[in-house]
Image (cartoon, rainbow, N blue to C red):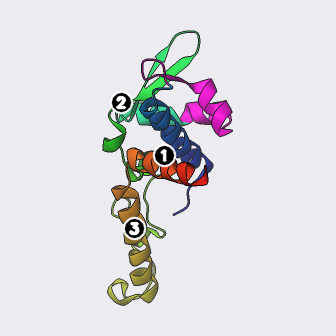
Amino acid sequence: MRLSKRGEYGLRAMIYIAGASQSHQAENGMVQTRDIAEKENIPRNTWSRSYSPLKMLDCCTARWVWVVDINLGKPASEINLGQVFRILDGPVAPIRCVSQMAYEPCGCPDEATCGLRLTMLDVRNAIANILDRTSLADVIERVEAVKSISL
């Protein structure tokens, strides 16, 4: 499992949109993609390829005017990082034989007692649990808490 640049940019953009919506900085809940790209230092063409799959699963919606406006398709509390990660980067598993979405048998002699597989299964489960339990709203709350401490 590796977070690709597309996944990183997509997650950062979704967190930005959630934060802008929650703080009422977004007009009608909409944020311009060029603002996201500028504020999060994301190449525009990379982000535009990331939000298409997110739109298909109702994580965000877009409207084309002179520029692209985008917002969350549902409340930030209903979108978890695991959903966004899987949409953009696929399975969370570090090796295919522990994947729940894209399982492939490995080449070890006994999969049931393979030490590497058992360890990577723990890794997969730990990462998936954190991502699946953490919503965009949770991230915004955490960011705001850190900001208030640093003031």
Alpha-carbon span between mark 1 and mark 2: 16 Å
> In front: mark 1 or mark 3?
1
Q: Residue at x 58, y 15 (%)?
A: 67
Name which quarter of the figure residue 41 lies in: top right
Give the camera-side residue of 133 and 110: 133
Residue located beneath label 1 in the image: 88
**Residue furthest top in the image:** 66
Residue type for callout 3: Glu
- What residue is drawn where x is 54% and y is 38%? 13
Q: Residues within 10 Å of mark 3 (few under 14, many from 20)?
A: few
**N-term mark: 1 or 3:** 1
Helix, strand or loop at label 1? It is: helix
- Looking at the rendering, the stretch of residues picked out in magenta corresponds to 26-49
Look at 38% across and 36% down and name the residue there: 59
Residue that numbered label 3 is attached to: 104
- Name the N-terminal-most of marks 2 and 3: 2
Quarter residue 123 falls in: bottom left
Q: Position of residue 137 (x, y in %)?
A: 39, 44
Looking at the image, residue 117 lies above or below residue 125: below
Judged by depth in the image, the label closer to the viewer, 1 or 2, is 2
Residue 39 inside the magenta-drawn segment? yes
Question: In the image, 100: left or right of 66?
Answer: left
Q: Is residue 34 magenta?
A: yes
Q: Relative to the observer, which residue lies in front, 59 or 134?
A: 134
Residue at which label 2 appears: 73
Marks 1 and 3, Cα distance to the nearest angstrom?
20 Å
